[in-house]
Image (spheres, rainbow, N blue to C red):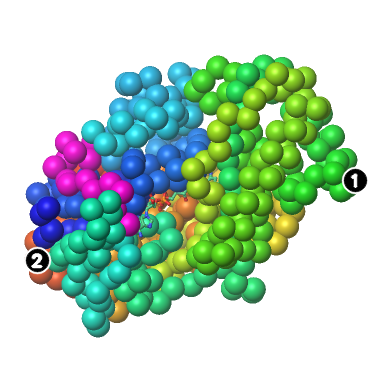
């Protein structure tokens, strides 16, 4: 096994995939290390869909995508292989997604390592020297000049001793975890029509104590398959996604909730009369966990006021979508059409880092700000920023804060990223 690279990317979700592709296209020897058997992260492992909205409109009413670059290429490839709903490109088939992502990473020239769990990080004074991976053959050490933490949970940085934040400022609680599930044999037209009525019954059941799920309503999405409906509606609150005992509890509670809702729907929804419980995510979906403390902490106030940072690497305007960390309810702050904010490069630089960047949902931000950019299109854009930055750092033997921001922005524009 080759164990020396220019850049190692930890984690193959949207952030890691886009980081690996963009750095590799800049001529770097990149290794993407993923603990599961496929790419896509939450989309593949936790059955998360659709791509939440990532566009705005200009003065002429034209749609402008805020996540372009590698993310748009992924969507175009998905579309070309029939992996999206024809009239709704945001809804995708995760099996086709896995094929598309494998192909794109391999075509970029990056090395892929599946079923490799990063378990140790050897880091001194902000510089990672090597990581240990555990796999079917035992274990190995991998070396690189630069590392990108795209593990969603900020695993690489946490193992390396970098500081992180967890949960909301008031009580340390993270957004709830959700085990997504799918029902098959659903009469989808009928089910869509009766959705409001079903939610009324659901609320009544809740008041009567017949439903244990804390979520206020049933949230479902159509899929690319006839008769199959996707449910993002279980809710596990007040547990820590970075504590293995809590995580185990969460998986058990959420599975009971999924079964409870399945039974409720079979009993009450005409469209689900013949439904079967088809599948659940391979692991519970984690909306929020560690947020690595960086050179800048992106805040709710900054994004609400649509701040445009000089060192922007990504643009976003998804709503501040906070599923109540302690029970019922979901709060929102929607951006008006035309409004957006940018994500600064300093948020992907862990404090004190000499050769590490972070990408995706675990970058440096408050609970509120993270609730907006945590969507897949924005994580992809941030990942691309990290990949381009790491390639530039490697080219010039720099530490992350020594980067020439203009050079970074130019290189990102060359890769069609939307940074302003
Ligand atoms: C229930 C739920 C619903 C959501 N709904 C939507 C939605 O509708 N639309 C939307 O756009 N977004 C949605 N999101 C948000 C979005 O899915 C995630 O925030 C986003 O996918 C995160 O991407 P990422 O690349 O940062 O991390 P992830 O997708 O979590 O990828 C991290 C990868 O790192 C790997 N990894 C972790 N640790 C290690 C290790 N030690 N060694 C090796 N590999 C490791 C993991 O296996 C994983 O593949 C939802 C999230 C949840 C949980």
Q: Residue at x 33, y 65 (%)?
A: 119
Q: Which residue is mark 2?
A: 396
Q: Residue at x 53, y 54 (%)?
A: 287
Q: Residue at x 60, y 23 (%)?
A: 184
Q: Is residue 353 left or right of residue 391?
A: right
Label 2: how many residues lie within 10 Å, few (<14), some (14-19) or many (20+)?
A: few
Image quarter of residue 226: top right
- Determine if the magenta segment contains residue 110: yes
Decide which of 286, 254 is in the foreground and name it.
254
On residue 122, the disc is: none
Decide which of 354, 41 is in the foreground and name it.
41
Q: Are circles 2 and 1 on residues that touch, CB within 8 Å?
A: no
Label 1: how many residues lie within 10 Å, few (<14), some (14-19) or many (20+)?
A: few
**SS at badge 1:** loop
Query: Is residue 345 among the parts visible in the rendering?
Result: no
Q: Is 368 drawn above or below residue 35 in the view shown? A: below
Q: Residue at x 50, y 47 (%)?
A: 283
Q: Is residue 374 left or right of residue 186?
A: left
Residue 270 placement (x, y as % from top left) = 77, 20
Image quarter of residue 326: bottom right
Residue 415 placement (x, y as % from top left) = 21, 44
Query: Sequence order check: which comes first, mark 2 or mark 1?
Result: 1
Residue 278 placement (x, y as % from top left) = 58, 29
Q: Which residue is mark 1?
A: 208
Residue 149 placement (x, y as % from top left) = 32, 61
Query: Is residue 394 among the parts visible in the rendering?
Result: yes
Q: Which residues are magenta?
A: 104-117
């Amino acid at each position: 096994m080759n164990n020396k690279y220019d850049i190692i990317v930890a984690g193959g979700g949207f952030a890691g995939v886009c980081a690996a592709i963009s750095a590799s296209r800049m001529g770097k020897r990149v290794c993407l290390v993923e603990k599961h058997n496929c790419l896509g992260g939450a989309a593949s492992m936790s059955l998360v869909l659709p791509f939440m909205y990532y566009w705005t409109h200009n003065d002429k009413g034209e749609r402008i995508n805020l996540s372009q670059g590698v993310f748009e290429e992924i969507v175009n490839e998905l579309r070309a292989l029939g992996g999206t709903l024809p009239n709704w490109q945001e809804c995708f088939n995760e099996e086709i997604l896995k094929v598309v992502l494998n192909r794109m990473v391999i075509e970029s020239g990056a090395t892929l390592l599946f079923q490799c769990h990063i378990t140790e990080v050897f880091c001194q004074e902000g510089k990672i020297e090597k990581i240990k991976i555990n796999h079917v053959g035992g274990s190995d050490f991998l070396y690189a000049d630069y590392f990108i933490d795209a593990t969603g949970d900020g695993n690489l940085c946490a193992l390396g001793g970098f500081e992180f934040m967890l949960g909301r400022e008031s009580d340390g609680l993270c957004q709830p975890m959700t085990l997504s599930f799918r029902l098959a044999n659903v009469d989808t037209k009928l089910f869509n029509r009766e959705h409001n009525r079903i939610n009324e019954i659901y609320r009544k059941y809740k008041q009567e104590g017949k439903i244990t799920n804390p979520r206020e309503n049933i949230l479902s999405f159509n899929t690319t398959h006839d008769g199959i409906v996707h449910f993002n509606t279980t809710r596990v609150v007040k547990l820590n996604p970075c504590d293995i005992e809590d995580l185990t509890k969460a998986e058990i509670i959420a599975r009971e909730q999924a079964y409870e809702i399945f039974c409720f729907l079979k009993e009450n929804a005409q469209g689900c009369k013949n439904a079967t419980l088809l599948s659940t995510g391979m692991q519970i979906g984690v909306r929020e966990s560690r947020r690595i403390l960086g050179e800048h902490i992106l805040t709710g106030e900054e994004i609400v006021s649509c701040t445009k940072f000089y060192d922007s690497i990504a643009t976003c305007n998804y709503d501040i979508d906070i599923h109540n960390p302690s029970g019922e309810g979901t709060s929102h702050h929607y951006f008006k059409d035309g409004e957006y904010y940018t994500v600064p490069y300093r948020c992907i630089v862990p404090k004190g880092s000499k050769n590490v960047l972070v990408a995706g949902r675990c970058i440096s931000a408050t609970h509120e700000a993270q609730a907006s950019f945590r969507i897949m299109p924005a994580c992809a854009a941030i990942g691309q920023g990290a990949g381009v930055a790491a390639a530039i750092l490697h080219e010039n033997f720099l530490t992350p804060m020594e980067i020439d921001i203009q050079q970074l922005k130019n290189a990102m524009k060359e890769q069609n990223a939307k940074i302003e």
